[in-house]
Image: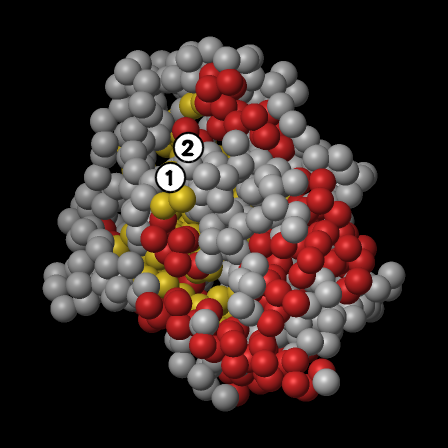
Amino acid sequence: MKHSFITTILISTFVLAGCNSDKKNTDTQINSESTVEPANKSIQTEGYNEFRNPYFGQTHQHTGWSFDEAIYNVKLGPDNSYRHARGEKVMHPSGYEVQLKVPLDFMVVSDHSEYLGVLLKMFDPNNPLSKHPMAGPIVNSGNDIKASTKAFYGLVSATIQKDGSTKPDSILDSPELKKTLWDEYVAITDQFYEPGKFTTLAGYEWSSQPNMSNLHRNIIFRSTKNLPIPFSYFDSQFPEDLWKWMDEQRAKGLDLLAIPHNGNLSNGIMYALEDSYGQPLTKAYVESRARNEKLTEIIQTKGQSETHPSIAPNDEFAFNFELWTKPVAGPGTVKIVETNYVRNAFENGMVLEQQFGTNPFKYGVVGGGDIHTSIVSHEEYAHTGEHNLKSGTPKERLLENVPGEPSKIEQGTAGLSCVWAEENTRESIWDAMERKETWATSGSRITVRVFGGFNFEDTKPGDTNWAEVGYKNGAPMGGDMPKATNGNSPQLMVWAMKGPNSGNLDRIQIIKGWVDANGKTHDKIYNVAWSDTENRKLDSNGLLPEVGNTVDIPNASYTNTIGSPELKTVWTDPDFNANIQAFYYVRVLEIPTPRWSTYDAKKLGIAPPKDFPATIQERAWTSPIWYTPSK
């Protein structure tokens, strides 16, 4: 009987198978690719650039193929996300049209591997899955948020055991059905791939969440040929098993990488100094993690994971910036510990490297979305929410709240994943991720580039040959700095340009971390380039006066009469010790602009919420450049 039902399902499935609009904003669109060849050119044209172009994309997007999206009445699939990302006008699941002011260059739709595509098929009355016992509560919920939430928790409770292990439905999780749906999913990815113009990469999310502690990873493949059925939380809740599976795929000739996200919601276990079983780390563990996890997500809709004010009290820009305090679902608060955060992981990783010879946390960084509507939603002035029914409209985001769910005021817009790559193709984009030549933004399209080394001579950012010199004599973001020479201190050539439809730049900072001779970790923030240099001077502690604030909160507008569209410098580390291991990453900050909640408040004719900032300083982070002393 069960075999017959699965076969029927398989056959049926196969067959069926820009600028702030307020006039007060005097922003002018800046070409953020001004120092390199334009992107979005065909592979056969001059768009190929051996010194690499900047590309902006999304590596964490959900559609109705995710169980926790379909269950909230999202019937839009990956095709809607791809069309939206490449600049087309599409429908939001709440019933209105949306369109990006500036298209993205690449996209990874990363739906949850658990029950991938299954719930969406239940909405089709001609599909046998619509007759499954679980289908009724899901399909009949419609736009009733209470009914959808009840159906969601019913599905979860029927699948996840008290000890965190899983017991998926044998029909919905059958290997045959999973393969059929996965093949369809990959085929959609291929359908929207336009080499040189718009790149789609196959990927999915592994969704382990033991005791409501987030351990999720996105898996991204370099190619779409001969891909295996995804390894899911149903296969194992332990990342060590995921890495083993990834190693097995690599041995078969596949290229793939994992991107952990939301360390801020992990209760200390994302970058823990012990394994998943509470045992001390081993050489095999650190090597396996380093081999499989090249990147980590530093920001997304559920907050930033760079650091926290209680962890970094001297970081003035850690305060009041996209801090998420609640679990993903359910009551309570998240534990604030250093092993939640990326900066601490960088530092602790160097300590582990001294012990094991490998740094398991030698990550590059990207920004993510985790938006569960099929819409990218990375623009503050056009935020469309993180979940349908829960936050799809301004009223839902600011005036309504689902019982037992976190307040929607804490959610942010999507971050962006950005790369320096030779051309806009799968191979080039993925290779940039693999070598960690990546940066993240909080949603705006800031372009940033950095090279670190000891022999740049008189070369400066913006010189016609500065990228060539940077690659030849130094290391780009994500790379390893050459060995120190002649007692010199390292130099970092840094350049940043504002994006279109966003605020001018306030400053460039360099965050340095190191491990001293006693094995203790440290970090320090240096302000290295800033706007209005005539009136803003560093004080004795290296701090800068604030850039100012032009935001008109009631009108949700601002002007670019402060800040600079471009900043650049060559910075020399004044505290360098050639015997001390260190890393350097760049953080670029914009001037204050209205947060999405302020735009929503204006639309609703109310004051912005008092318990969250009305403005935001959008920012970018680069992957670190690493320095290791000569042996």
Q: Is residue 576 left or right of 152 when viewed as pictured? A: left
In-front residue for pair 34/608: 608
Regarding residue 507, the answer to whether it shows in the image is: yes
Q: Amino acid at mark 2?
A: Ala
Q: Residues within 10 Å of mark 1 (few under 14, many from 20)?
A: some
* Vertical relation: 150 (above or below) 108: above
Residue that sits furthest to the left in the current view: 45
Residue 494 placement (x, y as % from top left): 34, 43
Q: Residue at x 37, y 17 (%)?
A: 558
Residue type for callout 1: Val
Quarter placement of the N terminus: bottom right
Q: Nearer the viewer, mark 1 or mark 2?
A: 1
Under tag 1, what secondary structure? strand
Q: In the rendered image, which residue does mark 1 sit on?
A: 98
| Residue 93 shown left or right of residue 41 in the figure | right
> Quick check: 362 left or right of 348?
left
